[in-house]
Image (tube, grey):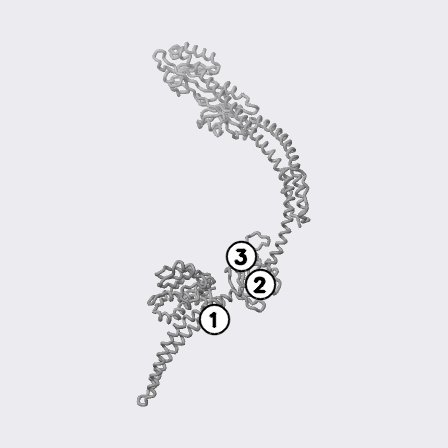
Amino acid sequence: MSEKKFPWWMRIKVRVLVFGVLMSVLPLLFLGFASFNAARSYLQESIQEQNYERSILLAGEIQDFIKNNADSLSHVTLTNASDLVGEDSIAREVILGTMLREVPYFESLEVSDSQFRILGRVSRREVVFPVKQEEKLNNLEFSMDNDFSISGVFFSEDGRPQVYLTVGIKDQQTRKNIGYLQAKTDLKVLVTKFTNIQIGKAGYVYLTDEKGYLIGHSDFSRVLVQENVRKNPAVQGFLSGIRPTHQGNEYNNADGVRVIGMYAPVENPKWGVFIEQPVKEAYQPVTQFFMRVIGIMLFIILGVTLISVFFGLKLTKPIEHFEEGVRQIILTEDLNAVIPQENDDEIGRLVQAFNNLLRQLGDKTTNLRNEQELLQTVVSGIGAGMALVDEEKRLLWWNSIFEGWFAEKDLKNLSCEDVLRRDGLDCAFGENGKVLALEVQGDRRYIRQTYYELSPGNSENAAYLLLLEDVTQQVEMEARVIETEKMAAVGLLASGVAHEINNPLAIVSAHSEELLDRMREEDDPPKNEEIQGVLRVIFKQMDRCKQITSRLLNFARPGKQGRDLINVSGAIQQTLALLSGRAKQKKITLIDETQSGLWVYGNENEWQQVVLNILTNAMDASVEGGCVRARAYRAKSEIRVEVEDYGQGISEHHLSKVFDPFFTTKPPGQGTGLGLFVSYGIVQKMQGQLLIESTEGKGTTVRILLPFRESGGS
């Protein structure tokens, strides 16, 4: 026997090793990566939280810077309100100059009345010229609801960012606003302090105003050109009023570098503090941690893999030995061989069980061969031809009887059609139990063809079992029984036929005697016209007798074998005509309600026998003056034939026996008891059903159901 090869990756050793390694490595990988992801998330959140808190702190420092300077202005206005807006310009200049020296961030100070008209000014860097008439402060926006107001950022001639801080001057007694004190505040020191803060190695801090313009940046040239960075995702969040969180956004900055951006808003002024740090730098601790985790996992995986391989090889070695032993048994076909048992574990017990199974298999093989020989003897002596055919109807196997009937040449590789069609049989397998005539060794035999569908997957790959039975004796016996019943029916019909013939014979006798008497009279001999008239009457009555005897002879004549398309209604009408004489004797009315064009497949003589038996029984059961109704019609795909009488009916006790052979309730000499038995068998051969419904005292209905066939088909 040839051994089917299979790929190396299908071997159990490979699969066990792969399974062991995977089951060892995958959990480690899963746990390792799960731990790493958790640690990475924690580290990333820590880094983002650190930058977020730093941005909040810087925003608070800016807020404190502005607030402290505004408080300095407010303190001066509280203590020197009247001097600041009074007529004494020298006192006003002294106050402003003192304040200018004490607060290094103020570049200049200006005082105005309540209408923003400047009353006096001092400057740290500029020459102070006399105040022009109606000259007003630069920042005129001021709300009494706030302690101070702050202008937008602007830049001095030397590029320093500056803002105007303005506070109101209130009368100490009336608390009404009597003027304003405004300081031009320099932001250079503050911005430089923030933008010089080092965030890692490449991180940086920058400031924007409420419109997205840069106020401070490590690259001060971008501040000088008043660059608008509102397209920056973090700046967009700030300008949109989105509340910042410790989870920053990752995006590409203006230089195309991937950064983590955090921001914090300054309440007053409406500025924003932003921190951006490259992702690669920010997450460098995460990368270092990942490399350490990978190293540890690789070391553990290597150790676990070696252990899995060792135990996998130890497990599969006995299995390989077992496989080698089984392969050797298959090659030698030695069912008495024994595979050595190496240990007492599950595999060892499997080897032991296989040896026991092998021994039992050897015993059963011997028994199977003996039974196969016995079956071959039975099949050869069963007296029926048997053959196995596949889906394509090719012969796979046949017994000696089949070979004796059909083996005029070698049957090997022939199709069932080639072997059987020549003898009138076929392999269409459309009708089971079909009986056909066959010439076997010069003798005419009748063969019943039966087929059985086999379950798929059998050893022969056969689809059907074809059984050909020699039913010659059965067919001949049935034919003799049908013929006997027919002759009995002919005997019963004879009296009615004789009575029907007597009427035309009496007419012939009367006209003949009258014609002879007139021909003897010489005085008044009959004329030629009268003689011709009498002869026409005699000819008509004799033709009537001929038709009556022809119907009887046609029924009594032995019928031909075989089946063909027959007209159901025609046979019924012929039988009704045949029974008309007997019906007249019993004064029974025969009613014909048959439709035309009703075709079935069967034997015409046998069908006429069925109709005669049923109509005869109906007439025998009818009382004088009764009627028998015969119907034939089509209902969808079947033909229904019904014979109904209104006689005495059949009792329930007798109704269950009406199809038994030799059962009859008629007096001796009036029935054989085979009529319904034979009719039932004929209807079954026509693939139909014969049903009887009867109510005692009311009548009986016999119903026959037959498959309808088109007149042009078979």
Can residue 329 be seen here? The reply is yes
Q: Is residue 674 above or below residue 104?
A: below
Q: Is residue 574 above or below residue 373?
A: below
Q: Mark 3 or 2, which is nearer the eye?
A: 3
Name which residue lies at 62% across and 28% down: 296
Report the Cα–Cα distance between label 3 and label 2. Answer: 18 Å
**Residue 259 image point, x, y percent:** 53, 28
In terms of depth relative to the viewer, which is nearer, 390 or 145? 390
Q: Which mark is residue 558?
A: 1
- Read off the residue under disc 3: 452
- Read off the residue under disc 2: 419
Kindly indicate the quadrant of the structure image that contains residue 21: top right
Q: Give amino acid for label 1.
A: Pro
Say which label, 3 or 2, has the lower sequence index.
2
Other residues around mark 2 within 10 Å, as few (<14) / some (14–19) / many (≥20)? some
> In the visual, does 377 lie left or right of 436?
right
Report the Cα–Cα distance between label 2 and label 1. Answer: 33 Å
Q: Is residue 239 above or below residue 575?
A: above
